[in-house]
Amino acid sequence: MQRYFLTETPETDEFDLPADIAHHLMTVLRGKVGTMAEFVYPDRETMVVAKVSEIGDDVTRMMVVERVEANVELPVQATLILGLAKGDKPELVVQKATELGVHHIIFVETDWSVVHWGMKADKKIARLSKIAQGAAEQSHRLTVPDVQYLPNLQALTLPEAMIKIVAWEESAKQGEAAMLAQQFAQLRSGDEVAFLVGPEGGLKEAELELLTEKFGFVAAGLGPRILRAETAPLYALSALSFALELER
């Protein structure tokens, strides 16, 4: 069943669809009277199943038939901080990370970033936000991750209590394998965790020093193999899901 995110809370169990959602449901999906869909309210907690009850020239009216309780979100707030990567890698990571449960995605320029967004950042973020919404609908999330851009690592502002992990290639090369699991073991429901992954060229040691000393990041290897910039964040989220949702 198709899922949509509403930007306004319906006042009654009957509500009219916004034009963009009506177009998708009725034109793209060829909906008709009786067609049902899921709708997540702006509080990102309330979800209903509603059916098309009336079709007019300028209106598609829905009637709520069921209120649904769903527990599909990660038990912690997960943030990805990603060095800018080439090509369509940002689009891929946003889509897949949304499916894996991320809540916040921050793209940041680092010293070895090959690409630079500059004046194009707003346009890039708008496109990536649209991809995040589509992925959230497809994966039946209750929330759409927010996507941001920062010009450098110094611009980061993160809660002090957040557990912060930076993927560090040298840790993997040296065989370090325990730090990621140790950080996960500290997490409790409602906590916040951030994963930072550099671009294709990785991070400078000076950047690692900034992250560990100023922001409180812990360097960790992500297994014995060297992962691509677009693979590492998805590995981290998958490992987080296993540790908090499947293993416990």
Image: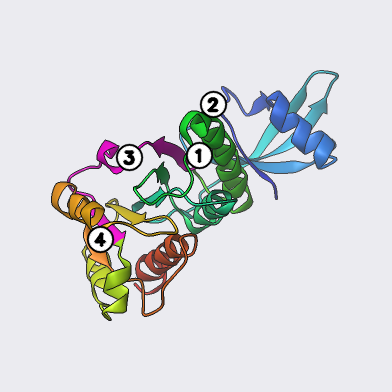
C-alpha span from label 3 to label 4? 28 Å
Of the residues shown, which amino acid type is indicated by label 3?
Asn
Separation of marks 3 and 1 at Cα, in angstroms: 37 Å
Residues under numbered marks 2 and 1 in contact, where contact means CB atoms less than 8 Å apart:
yes
Q: Is residue 127 left or right of residue 16?
A: left
Say which element carries label 3.
Answer: loop
Residue 153 versus residue 138: which sits nearer the camera?
A: 153
Q: Would residue 35 be found to the left or right of residue 207 on screen?
A: right
Residue placed at 81% from the left, 39% from the top? 28
Mark 3 or mark 2, whichever is nearer to me: 3
> Of discs 4 and 2, which sits in the foreground?
4
Region of the chain picked out in magenta, as a range: 145-166
* Residue 187, label in figure: 4
Q: Residue 54 versus residue 213: which sits nearer the camera?
A: 213
Tell me where residue 218 appears, x and y as whole percent: 21, 61
Cα gap from disc 2 to disc 1, whole angstroms = 10 Å
Residue 230 vertical position relative to residue 16 in the rendered view, above or below: below
- What residue did someone put label 3 on? 152
Amino acid at dot 4: Leu
Give the mark nearest the N terminus, 1 or 4.
Answer: 1
**Residue that numbered label 1 is attached to:** 46
Q: Quadrant of residue 217?
A: bottom left
> Do residues under tags 3 and 1 come within 8 Å of each other at their CB atoms?
no
Q: Mark 3 packing: few (<14 Cα in 10 Å), some, or many (20+)?
A: few
